[in-house]
Image (cartoon, helix red, strand yellow):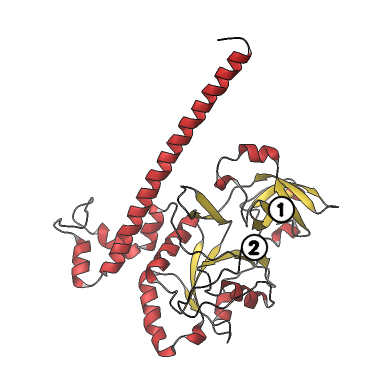
Amino acid sequence: MNKLVTLGWNENFFKTDDPAIIARVITVQRSSYRISDGEMEYLAHISGKFLNKANNPMDFPTVGDWVVVDKLKLEQKAVIHQILPRKSQLVRQAAGSKTEAQLVAANLDTIFIVSSLNDDLNIRRMERYIVAVYESGASPVIVLTKKDEYPEEQLPELISQMESVAIGIPIIVVSSVTGEGIQDLRAYLNPAETVALIGSSGVGKSTLVNVLLEQNVQKTKDIRSDDSRGRHTTTHREMFVLTNGSLLIDTPGMRELQLWDGEEAVDAAFEDVEDFASACFFKDCQHDTEPGCRVREALDSGELSQERFDSYQKLLRELAFEKRKQDQKAQLEEKNKWKQRSKNAKAAYQQRGFK
């Protein structure tokens, strides 16, 4: 059991009578998995029974998952039979037009939302990331990289802007070149706890991983100078063990982050807006022309910025639209399932000679 503890195993959440069959997913590359039991790593695939029972992408393993396996030690291979319950999971709407969830990582304690101090930094996008992290069940920490490239005199104003949307969330400014802020970041990397890094391409996630691990394990590339946009260097999700025993997950850069769920998380991320809304005279106030609207008063007085309120409303509309799409997809899948069952039953009767 001690070996599993090095990977973050916690008996307060997980209990098993046979730790030998438990492992943790440390790398995901399409349908291939690499798992570890704290002593040895294995190349793993999911069993046929597992595959037949899986209905959607959320049913498949992701990096950080604890799984029940059969190990072939001599071949260093394993078969995954089951995923243990997740205590947290970071999910987003998969890129593209399909209504489908994409599971980024699981069983996280903390998530570093990484953005660089250049044109990539976007307050509205940061709000979106904060909502996603709150919805995951993990704790957010904002990490602003490339401090050595940003004018020192402009930093206080930028931090103030960030604090206005990241209410109560730690904000760490770092430089992987000079080492500034790295020690502050290590305070959130505790033994046996799992931290994931998310953010756009080129913000310095892979460089940060190398600095924290004190060795070059991730490839890095320079950003494009014309628009500050990054090039993808991390192509898969992978977990690393730091020297102090904490677990660090690097993820590929996200060009966009579409939310999958999270109305309650919006309430947490926009605590300031919710406080104003709760003080409105009418409980169902639409914050438009109703009398006694505290939100309109805050907008008029400057206590609440129009941009912040617009972002709040936009995210709520987006989540409502996503929910409708998910409901429609679920209804269609249910209809198709029963339609297929009817066809199968009819075919079975015909085979028996019934017409």
Residue 114 placement, left or right of 163:
right
Q: Amino acid at mark 2?
A: Glu
Say whether residue 91 is visible.
Answer: yes
Give the x, y percent position of residue 226.
46, 79
How many other residues sit within 10 Å of disc 1, few (<14), some (14-19) or many (≥20)?
many
Q: Position of residue 108 (x, y in %)?
A: 57, 60
- Quadrant in the rendering for residue 155: bottom left
Is residue 118 left or right of 28 when viewed as pictured?
left
Vertical side of 28 occupied by 52: above or below: above
Is residue 334 found left or right of 42 in the rendered image?
left
Q: Which mark is residue 266?
A: none
For residue 238, the mark is 2
Q: Residues within 10 Å of mark 2 (few under 14, many from 20)?
A: many
Circle 1: element type:
strand
Answer whether residue 88 is visible to the viewer in this image. no
| CA separation in Å, label 1 and label 2 | 15 Å
**Residue type pointed to by label 1:** Ala
* Residue 23, label in figure: 1
Instruction: From the viewer's side, name the closer residue of 54 and 222.
Output: 222
Q: State the image coordinates of residue 296 (x, y, percent, origin top left).
A: 19, 63
Residue reaching furthest to the front = 226
User: Secondary structure under badge 2?
Assistant: strand
Residue 324, compared with residue 29, is above or below; it is: above
For the image, the number of numbered tags is 2
Residues 110 and 51: in front is 51
> Would you identify the image quadrant in which residue 346 lies?
top right
Residue that sits furthest to the left in the current view: 291
Q: Which quadrant holds the N terminus? A: bottom right
Q: Earlier in the sequence, mark 1 or mark 2?
A: 1
Left or right of residue 215, residue 150 in this image: left
Q: Is residue 46 above or below residue 226?
A: above
Q: Nearer the viewer, residue 206 or 127?
A: 206
